[in-house]
Image (cartoon, helix red, strand yellow):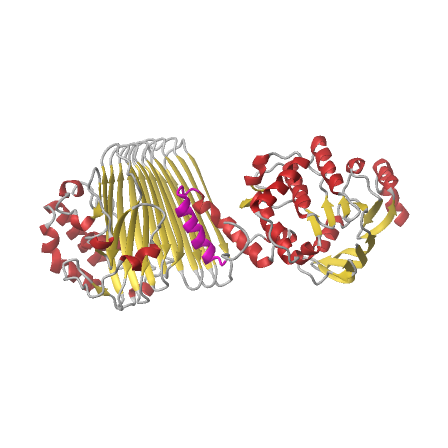
């Protein structure tokens, strides 16, 4: 497949080049050359030691280029996707089907700020794209390079200085059709000084055919900007997602990312923050609820590059069945980053002897006046707590569920929208099988 | 109400209870005293149905029926309540949600309709007033960050809500200052009736000044070795346990 992907790039390079200047084209070319040289990561790579991509690579995926004629034989209609929306919130909506932008399902805007697809922005907003695209991803691994080379559609957001979006953005990525399919999606989000945006993102397969989405996101936050990003990973058992998101933060900007993973075959999340100027704050929360043969992998990295920055990280995992979890949390405190506050916690419950989690905090601190803490736990449900609940008349099954929900609760407690919070609680409740129990979530 | 017959229990093969015999009737308060390691907490856990203990001999009858085969929740549904010596902290579950769940589970098990929200709230308010508790308490995570006194008061609050037939208070007085002790004791006294019974496990006579027992038992090395009225507690306070140990030897 490596050769097919590379061939697809070389075949279409002139199309890519036609919408961008030489700098961007050069970044694509360097990226494909690196992908060709390195190939897909294997378990021999330190970063992929516990996450074997082989399982995903074995399918015979169809590859579509953005320059192929689109097959509109059975286009999706709004009713097909309605149930995957967070309905109660009035949102901008940017919808993609098999990696391609769907204008008829989307509600975009260019009034005061831009919320649209990157595919329509390459030429029109070249002056914004050129200084940003690929600038945070140069040093990243082969999957990211592949994405950079083939990047076309995905969420494009640009908010000028001082503007707050009047409503959240929902980015929805659907896969459909009878054939296994491999999609690249690419987002570019540029928030000016004191700009504010909220993003809700969901990848959703509408078919039982195998699918793999390789997503890369670059986010640039100006001084004082604020962003809240919720990633909802509640996909079909046939769907794989590899996603690498990088957030670059200037002075006093605040970013919060929630990654809520309940379903999907194979989930590899990379989330990186670069705290480049003083006062920047990054908060990340994750919840993995895995069972069956699911794999849920979180790799996070925070670079504290400047003094007085804060990072706060809290990831929770519940692993049942034969599922596997991976958590790798890197925190790099660079030489100049005095007065850094970095907090990291990863707690896991393993509910079945065939389930496993590999968790590894990784702190590298080169400044001497910092406060950093990290902790990880792997355990079973607390038997004392279980007895306590049962002694109060709560049945064993419900007591277990109540403890699991309580354990998971932290991960979504911070989400402000009541309707989104309620939706997440419903998904968590459904996954943990507590739907019909007497307690409120 | 409850009849404990020649009860033997062990944990990891080690015998802890070695033949407990005790009968408690409705309307009675029994104090269970004894030095550390005599088996007091084991007795309360075994009655409540903790599965870590193996019952090697004997029986526990509740209203004439053996409860040894029942799960902890089934015992709770019959009207058994244990106020824990060390209440467990459960982050993410609010006090009000927990009590609501527990009370409605009880009602369901007894074939009653769940209590509607306003009746539930009214009842909670009533019981909180009784225990001089702050309203903000309901929305806090169960026992998380509670002081020792708050945890114990929360236990008694749950007891007041669930209205058990037999309540076992396992060292409810430990960790309480004198004001909290008075409030908790007042709460217990307000709930006393001819329909229910209390087993008060304590190290100290002090609590028994407030909750006056009908009977006092001394547990030593897994057996009740002495029983008497409230004057026995006073004597223990004065003389310690050594004289009883000597009597036994």
Question: Is residue B244 highlighted in magenta?
Answer: no
Left or right: A439 in relation to A371: right
Q: Is residue B50 visible?
A: no
- Asked if A100 appears above or below A373 in the picture, the reply is below
- Report the quarter where the N terminus of chain B lies: bottom right
Name the residue: 73% across, 45% down.
Answer: B169
Residue closer to the observer: B231 or A111? A111
Residue closer to the observer: B184 or A135? B184
Q: Position of residue B37 (x, y in %)?
A: 75, 48
Left or right: B225 in relation to A262: right
Name the residue: 79% across, 60% down.
Answer: B64
Name the residue: 51% across, 53% down.
Answer: A404
Q: Is residue B210 visible?
A: yes
Magenta: main secondary structure equals helix
Left or right: A342 in relation to A163: right
Question: Is residue A420 highlighted in magenta?
Answer: yes
Residue closer to the observer: A397 or A41? A397
- How many tags in the picture? 0
- Asked if A62 appears above or below A30 in the picture, the reply is below
Q: Position of residue A31 (x, y in %)?
A: 19, 52
Left or right: A239 in relation to B110: left
Give the extent of the magenta segment: A414-433
Q: Residue furthest right?
A: B247
Name the residue: 47% across, 63% down.
Answer: A321
Q: Position of residue A369 (x, y in %)?
A: 40, 31
| Residue B213 location, quadrant | top right
Q: Position of residue A308 (x, y in %)?
A: 36, 31
């Amino acid at each position: 497949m490596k050769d097919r992907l590379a061939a697809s790039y070389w075949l279409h390079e002139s199309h890519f080049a036609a919408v961008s200047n030489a700098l961007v084209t050069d970044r694509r070319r360097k990226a494909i050359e690196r992908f060709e040289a390195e190939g897909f990561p294997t378990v021999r790579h330190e970063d992929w030691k516990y996450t074997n991509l082989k399982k995903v690579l074995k399918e015979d995926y169809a590859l579509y280029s953005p320059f192929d004629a689109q097959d509109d034989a059975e286009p999706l209609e709004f009713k097909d996707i309605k149930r995957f929306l967070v309905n109660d919130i009035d949102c901008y909506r940017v919808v993609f089907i098999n990696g391609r932008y769907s204008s008829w399902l989307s509600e975009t805007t260019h009034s005061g700020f831009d919320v649209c697809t990157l595919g329509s922005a390459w030429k029109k907003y070249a002056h914004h794209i050129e200084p940003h695209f690929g600038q945070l991803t140069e040093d990243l691994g082969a999957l990211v390079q592949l994405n950079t080379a083939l990047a076309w559609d995905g969420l494009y957001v640009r908010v000028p200085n001082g503007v707050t979006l009047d409503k959240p953005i929902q980015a929805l990525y659907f896969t459909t059709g009878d054939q296994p399919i491999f999609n690249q999606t690419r987002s570019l989000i540029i928030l000016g000084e004191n700009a504010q945006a909220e993003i809700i993102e969901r990848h959703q397969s509408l078919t039982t055919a195998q699918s793999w989405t390789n997503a890369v996101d670059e986010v640039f936050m100006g001084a004082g900007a604020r962003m809240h990003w919720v990633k909802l990973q509640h996909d079909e058992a046939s769907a794989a997602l590899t996603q690498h998101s990088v957030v670059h933060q200037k002075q006093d900007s605040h970013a919060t990312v929630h990654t809520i993973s309940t379903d999907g075959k194979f989930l590899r999340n990379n989330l990186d923050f670069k705290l480049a100027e003083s006062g920047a704050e990054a908060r990340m929360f994750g919840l993995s609820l895995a069972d069956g043969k699911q794999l849920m992998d979180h790799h996070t990295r925070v670079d504290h590059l400047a003094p007085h920055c804060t990072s706060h990280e809290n990831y929770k995992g519940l692993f049942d069945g034969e599922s596997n979890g991976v958590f790798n949390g890197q925190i790099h405190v660079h030489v100049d980053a005095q007065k850094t506050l970095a907090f990291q916690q990863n707690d896991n419950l393993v509910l079945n002897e065939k389930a496993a989690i590999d968790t590894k905090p990784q702190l590298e601190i080169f400044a001497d006046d910092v406060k950093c803490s990290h902790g990880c736990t792997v355990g079973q449900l607390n038997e004392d707590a279980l007895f306590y609940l049962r002694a109060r008349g709560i049945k064993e099954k419900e007591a277990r569920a109540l403890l699991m929900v309580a354990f998971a609760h932290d991960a979504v407690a911070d989400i402000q929208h009541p309707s989104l919070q309620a939706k997440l609680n419903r998904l968590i409740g459904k996954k943990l099988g507590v739907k019909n129990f007497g307690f409120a979530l | 109400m409850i009849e404990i017959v020649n009860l033997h229990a062990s944990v990891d093969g080690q015998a802890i209870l070695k033949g407990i015999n005790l009968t408690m009737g409705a309307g009675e308060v029994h104090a269970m005293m004894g030095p550390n390691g005599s088996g007091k907490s084991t007795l309360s856990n075994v009655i409540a149905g903790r599965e870590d203990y193996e019952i090697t001999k004997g029986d526990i009858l509740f209203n004439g029926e053996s409860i040894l085969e029942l799960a902890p929740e089934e015992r709770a549904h019959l009207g058994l309540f244990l106020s824990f010596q060390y209440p467990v902290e459960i982050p993410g579950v609010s006090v009000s949600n927990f009590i609501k769940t527990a009370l409605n589970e009880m009602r369901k098990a007894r074939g009653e309709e769940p209590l509607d929200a306003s009746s539930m709230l009214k009842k909670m308010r009533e019981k909180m007033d009784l225990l001089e508790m702050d309203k903000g308490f309901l929305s806090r995570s169960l026992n998380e960050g509670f002081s020792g006194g708050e945890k114990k008061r929360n236990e008694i609050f749950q007891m007041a809500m669930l209205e058990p037939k037999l309540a076992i208070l396992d060292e409810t007085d430990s960790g309480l200052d004198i004001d909290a002790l008075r409030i908790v004791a007042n709460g217990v006294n307000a709930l006393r009736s001819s329909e229910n019974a209390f087993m008060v496990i304590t190290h100290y006579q002090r609590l028994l000044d407030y909750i006056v027992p009908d009977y006092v038992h001394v547990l030593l090395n897994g057996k009740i070795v002495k029983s008497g009225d409230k004057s026995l507690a006073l004597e223990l306070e004065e003389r310690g346990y050594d004289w009883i140990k000597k009597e036994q030897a």
